[in-house]
Image (tube, rainbow, N blue to C red):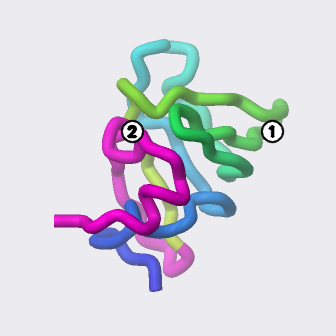
């Protein structure tokens, strides 16, 4: 089960997300649902279409299925999703 402690090891696609901080001021405040993920970006479906947000220099607030929220520094997500899911978290 996904929790704030293990969110880095789970699939992010389908989670609701808010960009809390970003190096590009136009990305801060973007919210919606994660529809895709690459090594360096999250693709978020907003009310105005899809936005591709770089992971580096961004902070994301994910809403987990149980309703809790967790803030994640995008640099900790910066790897291929399939590698991040299988990596060991210390």
Residue 16 image position (x, y, % from top left): 61, 57
Quadrant the C terminus occupies? bottom left
Say whether residue 39 is left or right of residue 48. Answer: left
**Rendering quarter of residue 9:** bottom left
**Rendering quarter of residue 46:** top right
Range of residues picked out in magenta: 65-90
Q: Secondary structure at mark 2?
A: helix
Residue 39 image position (x, y, % from top left): 53, 39
Q: Which residue is mark 1?
A: 47
Q: Which residue is mark 2?
A: 74
Say whether residue 34 is left or right of residue 78. Answer: right
From mark 1 to mark 2, how far is it between C-alphas? 22 Å
Q: Residues within 10 Å of mark 1 (few under 14, many from 20)?
A: few
| Residue 21 magenta-highlighted | no
Extreme-left residue of the structure: 90
Report the residue at 39% width, 39% height from top. Answer: 74
Q: Nearer the viewer, residue 6 or 70?
A: 6
Residue 14 image position (x, y, % from top left): 68, 62
């Amino acid at each position: 089960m996904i929790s704030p402690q293990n969110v880095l090891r789970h699939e992010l696609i389908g989670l609701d997300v808010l960009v809390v901080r970003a190096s590009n001021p136009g990305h801060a405040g973007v919210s919606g649902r994660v529809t895709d993920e690459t090594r360096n970006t999250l693709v978020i479906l907003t009310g105005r279409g899809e936005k591709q947000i770089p992971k580096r220099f961004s902070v994301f607030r994910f809403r987990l299925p149980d309703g809790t929220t967790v803030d994640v520094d995008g640099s900790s997500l910066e790897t291929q999703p399939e590698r991040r899911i299988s990596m060991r978290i210390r």
